[in-house]
């Protein structure tokens, strides 16, 4: 393929990897938890890297060399493109599950509210996480590129595979030592966002916005503490307690009454979408 086509494909691959991070975060928080999501993403990334490495080892999957005399290259076959794009797909899925889970999963291991220095330790962890990410990126675009240019694609792709395999192996071996926060299986984040949007639309003409925290606003669970940076909470306004609430305090119709947490999550998502 031409350089322009290859660049376009790589751009689409990067966009897909970034977009799937939203899916990975939702699945991790609502269904399987961060550990399982991270483990699945790591294995998927490793499979994608191995498939990509095979395109440099198996002659059937390699593009025909260009003619140095005619300066003409034969096009890639459908099989070659299918294998290449499948490797990109596996790596995109892996990135979509690893990126949103890795840093938070590490913070879960340090979470200890009884420790007065807990916040300082977590802040230090975040700093070192980004420092190590920057160093690894620098090594990837310098040392690994040098190896690929010096020793070829086989060695250049093989070394990251070995490192990734060791990473997956260590992650699985140390599994019994991890603190694994359970997913909120009783709550579906995506459905909750849609419910907040529908409830806000239904109450769009309601201009009475109380200033109290949880007296006239719906807070669920009842002991939840939500810091609200604005007062646009029509979706969680309790208009009629007998009609809107069940005896246990939960919403009788979640499509008509949303919690403060759901509204804030939707607002936060809308703010970052332009980015």
Image: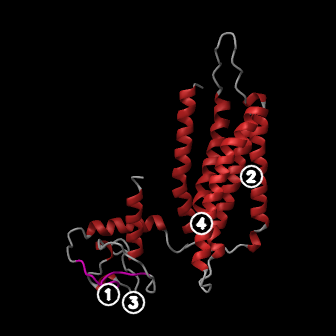
Q: Which label number is shown at residue 58?
A: none
Q: Which residue is mark 1?
A: 215
1 or 4: mark nearer the eye: 4
Q: CA distance from mark 1 to mark 4?
A: 37 Å
Going 40% across and 77% down the picture, which residue do you hit?
227
Residue 218 sits inside the magenta stretch:
yes
Q: Position of residue 139 (x, y in %)?
A: 69, 47
Disc 2: which residue: 164
Quadrant of res 150: top right
Q: Label 4, on which residue?
A: 126
Mark 3 touches mark 2? (CB < 8 Å): no
| Label 1 to label 3: alpha-carbon separation | 16 Å
Say which label, 3 or 4, has the lower sequence index: 4
The residues tagged by marks 3 and 2 sit, at their Cα atoms, a distance apart of 52 Å
Crowding at label 1, few (<14), some or many (≥20) Cα neighbours within 10 Å?
A: few
Q: Does the magenta run of residues contain 50? A: no
Q: Of all residues shown, which one is farthest toward the bottom?
A: 247
Which residue position is annotated with label 3?
247
Where disc 1 sits, the SS reads: loop
Separation of residues labelled 1 and 2 (CA atoms): 52 Å
Q: Is residue 55 among the parts visible in the rendering?
A: no
């Amino acid at each position: 393929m031409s350089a322009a086509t290859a660049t376009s494909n790589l751009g689409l691959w990067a966009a897909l990897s970034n977009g799937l991070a939203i899916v990975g975060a939702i699945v991790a928080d609502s269904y399987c938890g961060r550990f399982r999501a991270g483990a699945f993403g790591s294995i998927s990334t490793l499979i994608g890297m191995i498939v990509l490495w095979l395109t440099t080892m198996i002659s059937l999957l390699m593009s025909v060399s260009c003619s140095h005399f005619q300066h003409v290259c034969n096009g890639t076959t459908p099989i070659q493109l299918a294998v290449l794009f499948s490797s990109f797909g596996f790596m995109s899925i892996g990135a979509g599950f690893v990126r949103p889970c890795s840093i938070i999963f590490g913070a879960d291991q340090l979470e200890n509210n009884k420790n007065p220095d807990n916040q300082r330790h977590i802040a230090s962890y975040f700093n070192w996480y980004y420092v190590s990410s920057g160093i690894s990126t620098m090594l990837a675009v310098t040392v690994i590129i040098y190896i690929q240019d010096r020793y070829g694609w086989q060695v250049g792709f093989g070394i990251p595979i070995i490192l990734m395999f060791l990473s997956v192996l260590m992650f699985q071996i140390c599994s019994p030592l991890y603190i694994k926060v359970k997913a909120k299986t009783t709550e579906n984040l995506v459905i909750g966002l849609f419910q907040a949007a529908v409830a806000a639309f239904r109450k769009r003409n309601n201009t009475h916005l109380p200033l109290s925290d949880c007296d006239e606003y719906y807070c669920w669970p009842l002991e939840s503490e939500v810091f609200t940076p604005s007062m646009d909470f029509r979706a969680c306004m309790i208009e009629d307690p007998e009609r809107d609430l069940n005896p246990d305090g939960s919403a009788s119709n979640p499509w008509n009454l949303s919690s403060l947490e759901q509204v804030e999550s939707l607002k936060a998502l809308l703010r970052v979408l332009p980015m």
